[in-house]
Image (spheres, helix red, strand yellow):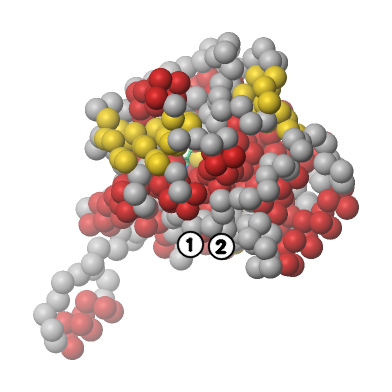
Amino acid sequence: MSGSLLRCAKCATQYPELDLRTECTCGGLLEVQHRPPPERGAALRARFALRRGYAGASPADASGVWRYQELVMPSAQQVVSHPEGNTPLLASARLSGWAGVRQLRLKHEGHNPTGSFKDRGMTVAITQAVRVGARAVGCASTGNTSASLAAYAALGGLRAVVLVPEGHIALGKIAQTIAHGARTLAVRGDFDTCLRLVREAQSALGVYLVNSVNPWRIEGQKTIVIELLEQLDWEPPDWIVLPAGNLGNTAAFGKALTELRDVDLIDRLPRLAAVQARGASPFAQSFDSGFEKRMRVDPHTVASAIRIGDPASYDRAVSAIRATNGVVTSVPDEDLLEAKAIVDASGIGCEPASAASVAGLRQLVRQGVIRPEERDVAILTGHLLKDPEAVLAYHQTGGGPPGLANPPLTIEPTLAALETAAFSRA
Ligand code: F0G
């Protein structure tokens, strides 16, 4: 039974669910369209809740992606799952205070099996790769997609090839990618170059592409929003703030929200705020022109995960921002690193790109776009340990505002030295 089809967002051509392609012959990106689920509203909520209660009984129910299968890939029989999702919704008075809002929650996607939100899309894309009999799977990546692809390809028994920009990938991510057995190619070029090359390899070498241009990745990533709304008892917040790079997640959030409204799971849409690093902010620059002009830039930022100059999901991210009356902004690296230091020091922790959401939230509050009394959820996209070099560089060079740097101290092996070092402020 097939419950879904692929539809070109540009020219509306339709392809069957098990088609291998990830883009239309016209060059447009494909979108998955599902048949309307048999249940909606309260009945669908009850079904999701029941599965949550049974988690552990079946691999699919234990996953915070496959529990929502009707909205993700209704016809999947066997899934390649870790399981993933089930990430916490956290609160921190210190962080709310820093951002200048009364009620901030953090949806921490760093709690996924490979430490980033990518696992939610990857479980679906690799499940699809197995269904269509792909000989190999591939992606271009700034690191998290490659780590996730490597792990899920190994779980699914598929050959994996990843292209990463040489010298611009965080230590934890490259370590994961090679450890899980993906063939890892460091390309002399940036992420955008890697993506162009792997797109060529897709047709020329028969590699099934699992970047977020793959429509099934988007289906999986929708569950960040679905799970977060379920955690809020289906009461939407006023704002969802997220970091933005290649714009797959922004696109997925917009698709999730409109579909949830269509099946009566929510009755109004939260506004999306997408946040880029200032030196890699083509989407924010386009937003400033009312999306009149698509911008491309030569990207520079310490947040290597979002060091992207020509985001692939641009068109569908524009639709997401428009559909949710959303905004797009950018933050300088200093703000992003300060936000990360506060997230880390509050005991939560995240990688640099993730902190763009918190830094962006504070900026939007200061600009009066977000009001302090509004209810906000910021997405933390990756785990602190993804980029240990960024942590050491920040704390050992004493960067940022006074009081935040916390370098390790070397001492003589005496109680006096220990007391001085531990209890006096440097
Ligand atoms: N945060 C982290 C930690 C990421 O790794 C990424 C993207 C983003 C945010 C931005 O999400 O691309 O959907 O707008 N990382 C990709 C990768 C590009 O290859 O791992 P986006």
Residue that mark 2 sits on? 92
Q: Residue at x 78, y 60 (%)?
A: 49
In screen coordinates, is 363 left or right of 63? left
Q: Position of residue 42 (x, y in %)?
A: 88, 52
Q: Position of residue 116 (x, y in %)?
A: 48, 50
At label 2, counting other C-alpha atoms closer than 10 Å, the crowd grade (few under 14, some 14-19, many 20 or more) is some
The amino acid type, in three-letter code, at marker 2 is: Ser
Residue that mark 1 sits on? 348
Q: Position of residue 256 (x, y in %)?
A: 70, 39
Q: Residue at x 13, y 84 (%)?
A: 413
* Residues under numbered marks 1 and 2 in contact, where contact means CB atoms less than 8 Å apart: yes
Q: From the image, which quarter does the N terminus lie in?
A: top right
In screen coordinates, is 270 left or right of 359? right
Q: Is the residue indicated by label 1 positioned so its CB lies within 8 Å of ligand 1?
A: no
- Residue 164: image quadrant is top left
In screen coordinates, is 177 left or right of 24? left
Q: Residue furthest bottom?
A: 415
Q: Is residue 206 visible?
A: yes
At label 1, counting other C-alpha atoms closer than 10 Å, the crowd grade (few under 14, some 14-19, many 20 or more) is some
